[in-house]
Amino acid sequence: MAKVILEPIGAPLDEGDPRVQRFREHMSGLEERIAGLRATIRDGWGQKYVDRVHVKGKMTTWERIEALRDPGTEVLPVGTFVNHGERFGDSPGRTSPAAGVITAFVQVHGLHTVVIANDNTVASGSWWPQTPEKIQRAQEIALRLKVPVLYLVDCSGLFLPEQGRTFPGRRGAGHIFKMNSLLSDAGVPQIAGVFGDCIAGGGYMPLISDKVIMTEQAYMVIAGAALIKGAKSQHITSLGIGGPDVHVHISNCADERVPDDQACLTAIRREVATLPSSATAYYRYGAEAAEPEFPSTDLTGLFPDSHTLRYATHDVIARLVDDSLFWELMPDTGQEMIVGVGRIAGLYVGIIANNQDLLDHPDKPGHKRPGGILYKEGIAKVSAFSRACNHDGLPILWLQDISGFDIGPEAEKQGLLGYGSNLIYTNSTNTTPMITVLLRKASGAGYYAMSGMPYDPVLQLSTPLTRLAVMEGRTLSIGAFNAKLDDDFEIITDDPDERARIEAGMKAVEARIEEDMDPTRSAALRDTDEVVFMGELRSYLSTVVEMCYQTPGTRRIKNPRIWTMHDLTVLWNNSATRGR
């Protein structure tokens, strides 16, 4: 029978190398800035609004999540930066930290769950522009991986001054309820705790859930008392219209009433405990989860402080896979790409990564060509490996640091458009979960070809180093002003005023592109799911890979003895032998 033989990969980090300390200091500065932004976003609208929640005898949303999780486990947020830097409503407008909703991976009774929780310190949990899309993205992850969804509902409806950007549209607020329905249709457990105001869409959101639990302060209404004619004179309240007295005992729109927030969270945990246990131990095939031989914290010292400098991609993989063991396939073909299999959290994962080294040119002996670019051989290798992973049921981890496709007359003659289209077709039709990490550069069509966000990875993560754009700012400024430049990209005018205008214009373009490439900017626009620190990357990957294997019977997972991967290896080895 074929065996999976994982071999040691990577080398220890040389802490005596002065570059390592320089790289760490650079990364520390980037992470410190992002940590500050995270803290501000987590505070919502500030202590004043936290106090308002506590005066009502309620917990804040983050307090609820902390009480919900299994002790000793991490809460891993997704979508932290959505709407960061935006203001809404009349000038000067209001901020909507995290779009007013917290979405996160939370472990409950040993099961990974997707939690969707309205932030009750931000306009009483209102929905803002991009709030519906953020909720739907969390629902999509749960639907694709078939993991339970827990709704912590405390929502006063749309932020009405911006209703035109939230209510209509293909992915407007109403699409949340379609996602509720699709999750239910797929048999994905949905459990809702209702903690307070649930008006209009907020009232609809929990109803399709399998279990709905209301606190004594909670109500669910299509329209609150404020919109009902004569409510004041009749002393009608929203609680009286749609509280637990009505929905638990009369309408049957809820299943259970509990006295307070803590009791509701206890009830949710009790319901999760009744679900089938995780299948991850079954799919480890007798192995145990193990930390990498080389610590993930090394990553802060591995990545250079300039995106133009190279690093050893094998050393990065060694800091992410269990025991730093890896089975590399076809290592001598398409060397600009690294493909192979490792374990993360004890579970098999296919890994595809850009090699950053200077590489021997296959057609020009004695010549080198840069890595981080897709050439014909590497594209073909990745396509074949991606198909094999899909056939065998291995989740694919894409580690992107790519400048794009090879360009020029030779590339066109070699048919790179066709090879690239084959790779795009493969990734577009794969059904196995794909996880994308933008380690550093994510440029041009290479970003698409390596399962960037437009190709529906179940999760896309960025790092503080990520630069997501069609091209770098300097390159784009040259393209924009190309008619004014010579073959060496020098300004060709002798007019000093015109030269100054061109220089200023090029600098302005470059500065704007640099600003757009800030990873928090991409995350604010939902072009990436989360910006994670290098030391957090392993935790996110372990969690998502476990989520890929948690629920059995939802996708093909072949026994490693009969992987297509083995056939690929035999064919490649025979071909390599004949070539010698």
Image (cartoon, rainbow, N blue to C red):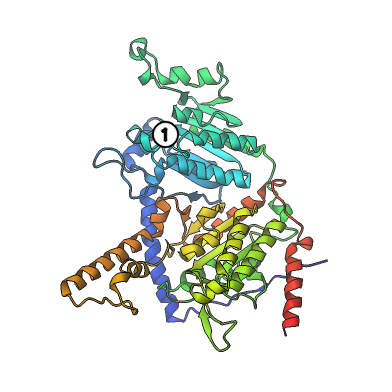
| Image quadrant assignment for residue 143 | top right
* Left or right: 231 as drawn, with respect to 16: left
Q: Amino acid at mark 1?
A: Phe
* Left or right: 306 as drawn, with respect to 348: left
Look at the picture and state if 561 lies above or below 213: below
As drawn, the residue found furthest toward the bottom would be 366
| Image quadrant assignment for residue 49 | top left
Q: In this rendering, does residue 67 appear at all?
A: no
Q: Observer-nearest residue: 177 or 104?
A: 177
As drawn, the residue found furthest toward the right would be 1
Q: Observer-nearest residue: 31 or 2?
A: 2
Of the 4 image quadrants, the one containing the N terminus is bottom right
Q: Observer-nearest residue: 140 or 41?
A: 140
Residue 140 in percent (x, y) is at 55, 44
Crowding near the residue tagged with mark 1, few <14, some 14–19, many ≥20 C-alpha atoms within 10 Å: many
Q: Observer-nearest residue: 159 or 214?
A: 159
Which residue is found at the position 62% from the left and 55% from the top?
A: 545
Q: In this rendering, does residue 168 appear at all?
A: yes
Look at the picture and state if 260 lies above or below 497: above
Residue 498 in percent (x, y) is at 19, 71
Look at the picture and state if 321 lies above or below 391: below
Q: How many marks?
A: 1
The residue where tag 1 is placed is: 167
Q: Secondary structure at mark 1?
A: loop
Of the 4 image quadrants, the one containing the C terminus is bottom right
Which residue is found at the position 56% from the left and 69% from the top?
A: 416
Residue 312 in percent (x, y) is at 53, 76
* Left or right: 146 as drawn, with respect to 282: left
Residue 127 in percent (x, y) is at 41, 36
